[in-house]
Image: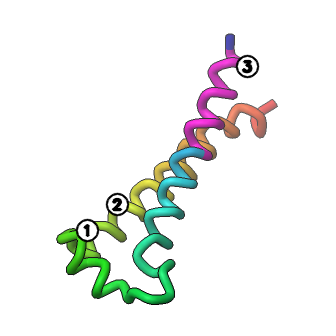
Amino acid sequence: MKSLTRKIGDWAAFILMAVGAGMFIWPFGNRHRTAREWVQETGIDLSIWLGLAVVFLVGGLCLLAVTKLPDRKD
């Protein structure tokens, strides 16, 4: 059961990190539109969007660290 829990934690960590990275890149990814234009079009404050991206990235990294911590103790 520990192995299954660890695998689920690893998957969740990688998904959180991927979502955070995608959120961080998304406003700046389009060549024909600036981040400012994207913000005006969507109506989302860029600082809040990037703050959430950082939360997802850091949360994924912390979850990955927690799931890998028992491996280091053995």
Q: Is residue 61 left or right of residue 1?
A: left
In the rendered image, the quadrant that contains the C terminus is top right
Q: Secondary structure at mark 1?
A: helix
Closer to the chain start, of discs 1 and 3, is 3
Q: Secondary structure at mark 3?
A: helix
Binning the other alpha carbons within 10 Å of mark 3 as few (below 14), some (14 to 19) or many (20 upward) gives few
Numbered circle sitting on residue 48: 1
- CB of mark 1 within 8 Å of CB of mark 2? yes
Q: Measured along the vertical axis of the image, is residue 64 above or below residue 30?
A: above
Q: CA distance from mark 1 to mark 3?
A: 36 Å
Residue at which label 2 appears: 52
Of the residues shown, which amino acid type is indicated by label 2? Answer: Leu
68 vs 33, nearest the viewer: 33
Q: Which of the two discs, 2 and 3, sits closer to the camera?
A: 2
Q: Measured along the vertical axis of the image, is residue 67 above or below residue 43?
A: above
Q: Secondary structure at mark 2?
A: helix
Q: Which of the two discs, 1 and 3, sits closer to the camera?
A: 1
Closer to the chain start, of discs 2 and 3, is 3
Q: Is residue 3 left or right of residue 34?
A: right
| Magenta stretch bounds | 2-14
Of helix, strand and loop, which mostly describes the magenta segment? Answer: helix
Of the residues shown, which amino acid type is indicated by label 3? Answer: Ser
Q: Residue 40 lies in magenta, yes or no?
A: no
